[in-house]
Image: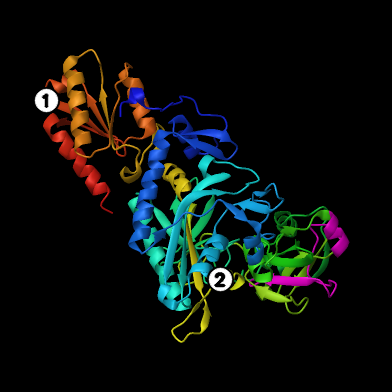
Amino acid sequence: MKVSQLLNPTLREVPAEAEVVSHQLMLRAGFIRKAAAGIYTYLPLGLRVLKKIEHIVREEMDAKGGQEVMMPIVQPAELWKESGRWDVYGPEMFRLKDRHDREFCLGPTHEEVITDLVRSEVRSYKQLPLLLYQIQNKYRDERRPRFGLMRGREFIMKDLYSFDRDPESARESYRQMYEAYERVFTRCGLTFRAVEADAGAIGGTGGTHEFMVLAESGEAAVVFCPDCNYAANVEKAECVSRPAGEDPGLAGRSGDVLTPDIKTIDQLADFLGIQTSSTIKALLYKGDDRYMLLLVRGDREINEIKVNNALGPFLNLRMADPGEVQTVLGCEHGFIGPVGLASDLFVAADLEVAEMTNAVCGANKKDYHRMGVACGKDFIPNTITDLRMVIAGEPCPKCGAALQEARGIEVGQVFNLGTKYSKALKATYLDDAGKEQIISMGCYGIGVSRTMAAAIEQNNDENGIIWPIPIAPYHCIVVPVTLKDENVVATANTLYAELNKAGVETVIDDRDERPGVKFKDADLVGYPIRLTIGAKALAEGKVEFYTRSTREVELVEVDCVCGRVQQIIREACQA
């Protein structure tokens, strides 16, 4: 491909709408253009990257026995109502009606459609296991689409669904897909971690893992153990209870104490001369139509995912507003405590709160807190469970080593669904004894367009994108520094033809532009290898060989260039 003929409109300035690096660089390098909020057109270079990721995904899914299908984007509401998710999925679902007033949605995911297909076509245990997948656009009406391809309203996803005879064989399918995902992201040249995660709206009871591309700009925090293989999203990570120890500031102090205008934990600790870990943070929440008081140590944060899993599930979980606090508890927010509450209010305490024997909490009256409070003596929670967010430095729940934290971008997730959908939609088979059994399921998603963005977030510098070779739009760019020197032009064209004939995806920058402009565009786009043809080096029979990832420049004999490029590409794609 000649750059003069390539639709690659590069930009020098950072677009004001772009907040994250991947969005900025994809716009500047001419990979995407915005059609509407969260909806993008993929230009030729962007589409080439997507197709390469899709190719890797297809190869790994096929290697595990997956069969590709294509399901409808427009899905009938009846299936979603049958599974019970029509009203659960929430406002993120694009809903529409046809001219006959029948309800449909634009598919955010395809569990219902695929289960409906399998229940109609699978009769016998001899047809199982079955792995069916597709690569297709998905639609979710994000409240605030942002970060380019990271959180859009239309995106490209691979979703595979496994159908097995029983939980044991379903776990084997899960293991096979877990391995396939490791292969996919390794082959894409990414640094990633698989972490324990929450199942969210997909559901299921058999566990789930997210695959996170590690990047400082990642929107999700993950913790991992350097000594064992434990890793989890902070929303899912198990917390080990750690007693805070004796607080000298509490010695001999008890009862209600005046704390005028003190509403935050830090203010309270400073005012009383105590540690924040000696306080109890009490927060009134509402789950659907039910109020509950949640208790964590003052130096901890509530984890709403854990709250929902332990006490719900709720369609709508939120913190109560000040008016609700006043109505339910008769006091202002900031002075709430668990002592002396109405008996009908549900109280849930974190594991650490249950161990507190000399704590400070709100006194349920304005400008007062209570000292010397003990769980089990002054108040008895309805339940004691893990309610808090983990932080780096805490002990690993598996081996006790200090957990470390990193930022990650979720690019894939694997779910063991159990019978959540097959039971609701009556997807069954006859076993070898002729008895009807419910199919065990799993589902496995990869955000193809998100993987493209995550690769850029992980691989960039001040000059532009640094593509991993396996998913780069082209492997190599040939840059003649001048079009006025016939020898330079002839050598550039010969190398260009030789590389393409050898299977190296190559472009040639044949524009009548200054060398600096060509170099800037090449770095911005992120071609892994740049071959610069100049008269001075060519007089010695050499060309300048520039490697984008290392910024190393060397002179290489013209006759050796093609073999050298082939070797680099071969080694990079052998994962």
In this image, 355 relative to 66: left or right?
right
- Compared with 212, 170 (above or below) is below
Q: Amino acid at mark 1?
A: Gly
**Relative depth, front residue between 81 and 558:** 81
- The circle drawn on residue 571 is none
Residue found 22% across the figure and 43% down from its top: 568
Residue found 43% across the figure and 31% down from its top: 29
Q: Is residue 100 visible?
A: yes
- Compared with 340, 488 (above or below) is above
In this image, 570 relative to 390: left or right?
left
Other-residue count near label 1 (Cα within 10 Å), few / some / many at <14 / 14–19 / ≥20: few
Q: Give the image location of residue 522, x and y in percent.
A: 34, 29
Name the element at disc 2.
helix
Q: Amino acid at mark 2?
A: Ser
- Compared with 527, 121 (above or below) is below
Q: Quadrant of residue 143?
A: top right
Q: Give the image location of residue 292, x and y in percent.
A: 76, 67
Quadrant location of the C terminus in the rendered image = bottom left
- The circle drawn on residue 541 is 1
**According to the image, label 2 marks what residue?**
422
Q: Quadrant of residue 387?
A: bottom right
Q: Is residue 404 visible?
A: no
Which segment did they paint magenta?
Answer: 323-352
Task: Name the main secondary structure of what is drawn in magenta.
Answer: loop
Kindly report the distance in space between the C-alpha atoms of the residues bearing marks 1 and 2: 68 Å
Name the element at disc 1.
loop
Residue found 77% across the figure and 76% down from its top: 379
Q: Say how the picture is coloured.
A: rainbow
